[in-house]
Amino acid sequence: MTQPINLAGVTAQSLFDDNFSELKLSWIAGLEGADKGFDPEAVKLASSSSDLVGHLNLIHPDRMQVFGVPEINYYEKLDSENRKRQLAGLISLKPPMLDSGRWLRTTR
């Protein structure tokens, strides 16, 4: 049987603080959402921590959205209009965080 995931106190700010040096993170959109965390219902339904991370996954908006190298490469190949549309669509779904080695932004 798996242990329940305990994310009490995990916020965008705590993830940033724990990882900013190693991942070279910086805030680009202000700190208004720094205290946001994961949706408690999504945490309850998660069977592992990977259930809380999406790699540019619009199907699961309650996951922290990660822009890794493949996602950034995909995004950079889009024309300007498609970039705007993709990012606006992702942000409108209000994931708890958007993250990459380049930036971390809360959206709620």
Image (cartoon, rainbow, N blue to C red):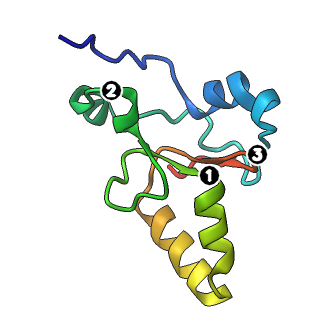
The residue lying at 33 percent from left, 53 percent from top is 60
The image position of residue 47, as x and y in percent, is: 25, 27
Is disc 2 in contact with disc 3, using a CB cutoff of under 8 Å? Answer: no
Numbered badge on residue 11: none
Tell me the element at label 1: loop
Q: Decide which of 85, 101 is in the foreground and name it.
A: 101
Residue matched to label 2: 48
Image position of 29 with respect to 16: above or below: below
Is disc 1 in contact with disc 2, using a CB cutoff of under 8 Å? Answer: no
CA neighbours of label 3 inside 10 A, class few (<14), some (14 to 19), many (20+):
some
Q: Earlier in the sequence, mark 1 or mark 2?
A: 2
The image position of residue 66, as x and y in percent, is: 55, 49
Spatial distance from mark 1 to mark 3, Cα to Cα?
A: 17 Å
Residue matched to label 1: 68
User: Which quadrant of the structure image shows residue 82?
Assistant: bottom right
Q: Earlier in the sequence, mark 2 or mark 3?
A: 3
CA neighbours of label 2 inside 10 A, class few (<14), some (14 to 19), many (20+):
few
Split into 4 quadrants, where in the image is the N terminus? top left
Residue matched to label 3: 27
Residue type pointed to by label 1: Gly
Residue type pointed to by label 2: Ser
